[in-house]
Image: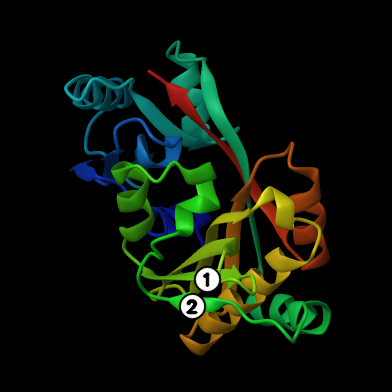
Amino acid sequence: MDLQAVAATGWGYVEHSYIGEWELRAAGGHTSRANCALPIGDSGMTLPESLNAVRHWFEERGLPGRVQTVEGSSLDQAIAALGYRETEGAALRRSAPLRPALEILRASANDARIAELTKELPADYFTVYRRGLGIPEFQTILTTGDAEIAFAVVRGDNGEALSVGRVAIDKATGHAGIAALATSEHARRRGLARIVLRDLLAFSAEHGAENTYLEVEEQNVPALALYDSLGFTTAHRYHTRLL
């Protein structure tokens, strides 16, 4: 299973286009995943021609050209060999069988609390995620994509959003992509992220998902420890190459 192709269905954009089987996405420069070319298949052109076309498409939108590549892949090395050596946005893409992870969460998360699940983006989601920066581009990124999307919010007794998360289920492959996880600073270390993950994975299992994946920065040690405990392993490291 090409996890890069699966993950492409789980993150949104404001506009997109295609060069053969390369998907080009733009969202005003907000997040590298929503502002890059995703080389999932054959572009129908030589690599230099493809990169020139990508660069031109982004230049028309006032954005730098970017191509997301799996670090060390043959394509990544070929682009670097053409002189495009600068990279940014490195992260790990990790995956796990869904049901074992869900059972661990059911055994370890507070079963007296549940997350509020909705298909629509909650109005106060950005009071937690992106520290309130709920600009229109971010709202569009979270609500678009080629997957079934749901959101989870754990609330305090006063209704305040404390911890949030998003899942995008790729029906074709049975993969549930977890993203946009965040917990308010004053509510951390209370196990709320486990509740969000548990209820998003339970929702995903009910909708046919068998595997789950997420993306995390290597510097996020607490998150890596949590994901390790749930059985996540690293499929690959990816970054975007600047053109």
Please tell me which residue lies in front, 159 or 176. Answer: 159
225 relative to 57, above or below: below
56 horizontally vs 184: left or right: left
Going 63% across and 81% down the picture, which residue do you hit?
Answer: 114
The residue beneath circle 2 is 117
User: Image quadrant of residue 228?
Assistant: bottom right
Q: Which mark is residue 109?
A: none
Q: Quadrant of residue 187?
A: bottom right
Residue named by callout 1: 152
Q: Where does the image place residue 198, in percent across and percent down from the top left?
A: 66, 76
Measure how far apart labels 2 and 1 are at the Cα level: 5 Å
Residue at image point 33% right, 23% down: 65
SS assignment at label 2: strand
Determine if residue 19 is in view: no
Residue at (40% x, 46% y) in the render: 134
* 194 to 18, vertically: above or below: below
Where is residue 100 shown, x and y percent of the image?
A: 73, 80
Say which label, 2 or 1, has the lower sequence index: 2
Nearest the eye: 77 or 185: 185
Quadrant of the rendering where the C terminus is positioned: top left
Q: Secondary structure at mark 1?
A: strand
Observer able to see residue 168: yes
* Three-letter code, disc 2: Leu
